[in-house]
Image: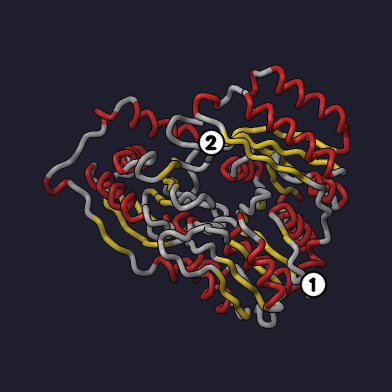
């Protein structure tokens, strides 16, 4: 990826790494690049999640946007997919989301959306990067009446809530659902969405205070939801991440339904309904082997991309497909949304439960998950990209791949959002793949 943007926007420790100055420059450059041919005074909408640094970065972004003559419209706390949807509804030239998604509170990020509501392709992000890092003198500032102004939108929440509700065409009455909002963006709208659709709702982690986003809750910490579903005798549980573009589920027995299983459930349902375009589901290289086995057994074609929901979306647009996603819970339902939408994913899952009359566990049984071990190895900036050139590491990976044969696989990759190398191994025997994963991780750690 580039020098400023990773696989999901610009991200870092708020204020010290992702600084106010950087946010201001991103605001300026984004306004100039994304609205350069619009023929009118540009308008850019801005949303944020609940983390304490959001207000500071929002102020810096607004200053940057307005200093080059564009108007900034503040949406307040809102899910990322709401920004993607509202760009078009509000006739904006671009959208910005201030969020570090599933990361802990000290991080924050800036995600950019074009006037069509889609995340930016690499070449446009590169153009913005070059303007900020190589040609800042080309960002001409305005003065006097040419400056932009800041306004506030009071209808964003309800416009998004109504949008999600309209995608569900069945009453969810009789379904009891537990929602884990990760003390993030879903806290402002999830209850109204699911109660409005007729479900009985138990709320958890919906009291954000600026510091508790993703803290032992949400889609990266599922144990609390598993327990809550069983204790409250719910039919299903849904967990979102900090900006609510991910969704993972829990069945009535407290068992995890991850993104791969959700994709299997959706794909099979859509195929049976005749709505699965080109009979294809787009997934990433991180998808479980069990998903590929499910797809083959059910006559579903798979298209595979590198990790990152932006690459899933690009493949969907290129091939004309309407569903794709990641094991982490980024599910893109392109008939209804331009990006991953956790609350929409959850609502549509409950719609499948209602239409089929099946329990969550029964739906999830469509796919068998292969044991998978994932180890994250922290690396310093100077070691990025180095592990791939160390023979001891690459030879070990090749050796263990040969030993696994056709019953497993190894994937080692650097994270696009965090200073980590991820070592993932799948296979039939947990003990063996755990041993291999630790051996590879140790070699990377020692390099």
Mark 2 and mark 1: Cα distance apart in space: 42 Å
Tell me residue 440's x, y (percent): 72, 30
The residue at 33%/49% (across/down) is: 57
Q: Is residue 297 left or right of residue 166?
A: right
Quarter the C terminus occupies? top right
Count of marks overlaid on the render: 2
Q: Is residue 342 above or below residue 439?
A: below
* Quadrant in which residue 397 is drawn: top right
Q: Identify the residue position indicated by label 1 in the image.
A: 358
Secondary structure, mark 1, is loop
Foreground tag (2 vs 1): 2
Query: Picture coordinates of residue 363 (x, y %)?
Result: 79, 65
Residues marked 2 and 1 touching at CB (< 8 Å): no
Q: Where is residue 292 drawn, in percent x and y?
A: 80, 45
Up/down of 153 relative to 370, above or below: below
User: Label 2: few (<14), some or many (≥20) within 10 Å?
Assistant: some
Viewer-side residue, 329 vs 88: 329
Residue occupying the point 18% across, 47% down = 147
Q: Is residue 37 visible?
A: no
**Closest to the observer: 127 or 342?**
342
Q: Residue at x 55, y 27 (%)?
A: 384
Percent position of residue 308, x then y? 59, 42
Instruction: Looking at the picture, tell me which residue is in the foreground, 344 or 226.
Output: 226
In the rendered view, would you say 358 is above or below 337? below
Q: Residues within 10 Å of mark 1 (few under 14, many from 20)?
A: few
Q: Which residue is mark 2?
A: 419
Relative horizontal placement of residue 447, taking residue 37 as reference (left or right): right
> Position of 430 compared to 226: left or right?
right
Q: Residue at x 55, y 78 (%)?
A: 196
Disc on the earlier residue, 2 or 1: 1
Q: Secondary structure at mark 2?
A: loop
């Amino acid at each position: 990826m580039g020098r400023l943007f990773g696989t999901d926007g610009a991200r870092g420790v708020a204020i010290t790494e992702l600084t106010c100055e950087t946010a201001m420059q991103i605001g300026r450059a984004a306004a100039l690049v994304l609205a350069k041919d619009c023929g009118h005074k540009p308008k850019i909408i801005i949303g944020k999640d609940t983390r304490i640094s959001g207000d500071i970065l929002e102020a810096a972004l607004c200053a940057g946007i307005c200093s080059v003559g564009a108007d900034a419209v503040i949406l307040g706390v809102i899910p990322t997919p709401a920004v993607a949807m509202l760009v078009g509804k509000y006739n904006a030239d671009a959208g910005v989301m201030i969020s570090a998604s599933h990361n802990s509170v000290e991080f924050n990020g800036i995600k950019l959306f074009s006037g069509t509501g889609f995340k930016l392709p690499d070449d446009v992000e590169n153009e913005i990067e070059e303007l900020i890092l190589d040609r800042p003198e080309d960002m001409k500032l305005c003065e006097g009446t040419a400056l932009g102004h800041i306004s506030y939108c009071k209808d964003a929440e309800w416009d998004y809530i109504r949008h999600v509700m309209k995608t569900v065409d069945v009453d969810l009455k009789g379904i009891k659902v537990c929602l884990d909002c990760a003390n993030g963006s879903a806290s402002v709208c999830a209850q109204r969405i699911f109660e409005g659709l007729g479900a009985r709702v138990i709320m958890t982690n919906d009291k954000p205070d600026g510091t508790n986003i993703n803290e032992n809750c949400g889609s990266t910490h599922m144990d609390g939801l598993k327990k809550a579903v069983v204790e409250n005798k719910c039919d299903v549980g849904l967990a979102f991440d900090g900006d609510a573009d991910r969704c993972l589920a829990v069945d009535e027995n407290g068992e995890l339904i991850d993104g791969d299983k959700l994709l299997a459930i959706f794909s099979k349902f859509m195929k049976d309904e005749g709505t699965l375009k080109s009979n294809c589901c787009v997934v990433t290289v991180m998808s479980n082997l069990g998903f590929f086995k499910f797809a083959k057994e059910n006559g579903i074609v798979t298209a595979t991309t590198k990790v990152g929901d932006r690459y899933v979306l690009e493949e969907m647009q290129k091939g004309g497909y309407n569903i794709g996603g990641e094991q982490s819970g980024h599910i893109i339902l392109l008939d209804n949304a331009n990006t991953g939408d956790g609350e929409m994913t959850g609502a549509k899952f409950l719609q499948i439960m209602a239409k089929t009359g099946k329990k969550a566990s029964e739906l999830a049984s469509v796919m068998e998950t292969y044991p998978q071990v994932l180890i994250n190895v922290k690396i310093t900036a100077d070691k990025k990209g180095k592990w791939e050139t160390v023979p001891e590491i690459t030879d070990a990976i090749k050796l263990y791949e040969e030993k696994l044969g056709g019953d497993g696989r190894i994937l080692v990759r650097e994270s696009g959002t965090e200073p980590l190398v991820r070592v993932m191994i799948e296979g039939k025997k947990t003990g063996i793949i755990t041993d291999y994963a630790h051996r590879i991780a140790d070699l990377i750690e020692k390099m």
